[in-house]
Image (spheres, rainbow, N blue to C red):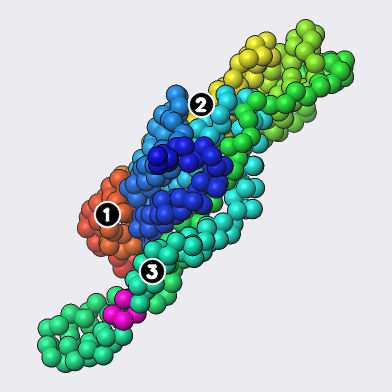
Amino acid sequence: MRKTEIEEMMEQTRTEYMKEKFAFFGGMSLLYGLLYTLFFYQSKMGINNILWVLSIIVIGSFLLKKTGIPKKKRTNIYLAGMILLGISSALTTSMFFYVCNTIGILCLYILFMIHQFYDKKVGGSLTYVKGFFVIAGNMFLSTFKPYSHTIAYFSGNTTARKKKWTAGLIGVLLGIGILAVILPFLLNSDAVFSQMVGRLLKYVNIWDGIQIVFSVLFGFHICYTFFFSLCKNSEIRGKETYRKKGNPVIGITSLTVIGIIYLLYVAIQITYLFLGIEKGLPQGMTYAQYARGGFWELLFVSTVNLFLVIIWSRFFEKHKVLSVLLALISGCTFVMILSAGYRMLLYIQVYHLTFLRLFVMWFLVVLALIMGGVTIKIFREKFPVFLYTTAVVSVCYLLFSFSRPDEIAAKYLVAQEKQLKEEDVYYLLRRPSLDGAEVLTQLDYERYSDRVKMDVFRYFSNISEKNKEMDIRSTNYMRNRTVKAANAFLEEHRDWKNLTEPYLDF
């Protein structure tokens, strides 16, 4: 009686099974390499990102099914996040978000696979972190596996397989040899055929061919080694080993010293910053100067406090006093985050809104939410702080990404048009992202110099020229919208073309 594939797999390790069934696993990896090249070779960011996400989800699902791993509950949230990140990349022209979206997609995909491959329930946050490093290490150690498995497959002991591939290779070489003899005669026999072949040969570029081959091999290599490392790593269990924790007295005394200083600092923030009491400020310093200073220092201290609470609660034995002190540090951190946010708002009122200032405000919100989860963990040990943090970062990042901060900053500056200086306009022109470009068409440029007008005209000319030829892969909502706005602006301001020498070189 013939064994089923599942029975065969149960008698082997998963890595041995992959080698045995190389025709499937290697074929799927090669398919990924081809799709990866099709989507991204010489293409800008657009809907190709969505297609790429769908391809890795579908191919991953087939590979999981082949290894007999059923899809587990609550994993669709990872896949949904990946798809949303892919959509976000098709709605923006910001390289910052494109890179972050790609990193986010890969991280969510790895988390999805960690959930699938662990036979037992995954443990605490260190298990996830360890999983990332183990998978990366296994991928490095498995660098030659795709090629050794390929050689083993094609040089197997099966006579029928040898005969098949040998016959196929002989047939291809024979066909090329005959074609080399008769093709010149065919080209001379028909002018239309000769012209058509000549046109086709114009598009044949050896360097492009080499790049395409390497791109396909890269996709094949990454897919195969990644799945091979997962199979190799599947023997590791999700439960973390027990570690003896440190004496809580060490944690209590160290936090007591820190807590006293923090309480004094928080009292000063409430008295001088939030209530605005100027009495007692250093000589020569106004309240506005005091309020705008110290943002980056507070951001750094707040981030350190986050890790301080996580490490102290994990590596010291649980104690009521220690828990109270950790909660105190957390409370002081919330005040510091609030203080940093208030200082940044005051700074924005004077120096306007930019992408970086929006980003740090977003970061403060995320930091506060993560700190909230860590605070809950102090009193509820079973609280899944890693999953909570992953969810918070994912949701907040998606909201930030879909909001297109460059466009928000541009709209804010346009709303403050009467206060804008030339350097503010040049700030928008220098942004690598086109997300705020359409907003620039709404400015009244009559109050600016000819130099600004010329640079703005050249800015939109550059956008129009660089985006004339876009294929379906590069279809991007924001790019398409910006090109239409740029063409309309250029048509309306044709007379700006011959103004004075420009300042910027695009």
492, 124: nearer the viewer: 124
Q: Identify the residue shown where x is 35% and y is 77%.
A: 170
Image coords of residue 290 (percent x, y):
68, 28
Q: Quadrant of the C terminus?
A: bottom left
Is residue 265 or residue 38 the one in the foreground? 38
Neighbourhood count class around disc 2 (C-alpha, 10 Å): few under 14, some 14–19, many 20 upward: some
> Gap in Å between the C-alphas at discs 2 and 1?
33 Å
Say which amino acid is labelled 2. Ala
Q: Of the residues tagged 3 and 2, which is closer to the observer? A: 3
Tell me which numbered mark, 3 or 2, is placed earlier along the sequence. Answer: 3
Disc 2 to disc 1: CB gap under 8 Å: no
3D distance between C-alphas at marks 3 and 2: 54 Å
Give x and y (percent) for residue 177. Answer: 31, 85
Report helix, strand or loop for mark 1.
Answer: helix
Which residue carries the number 3 mark? Answer: 163
Mark carried by residue 155:
none
Earlier sequence position, callout 1 versus callout 3: 3
Rendered residue at 69%/26% (across/down): 240
Estimate how packed mark 3 is, as few (under 14), some (14 to 19) or many (20 or more) residues with alpha carbons within 10 Å.
few
Residue 166 covered by magenta stretch? no
What residue sits 68% from the left and 21% below the top?
333
- The residue that mark 1 highlights is 472
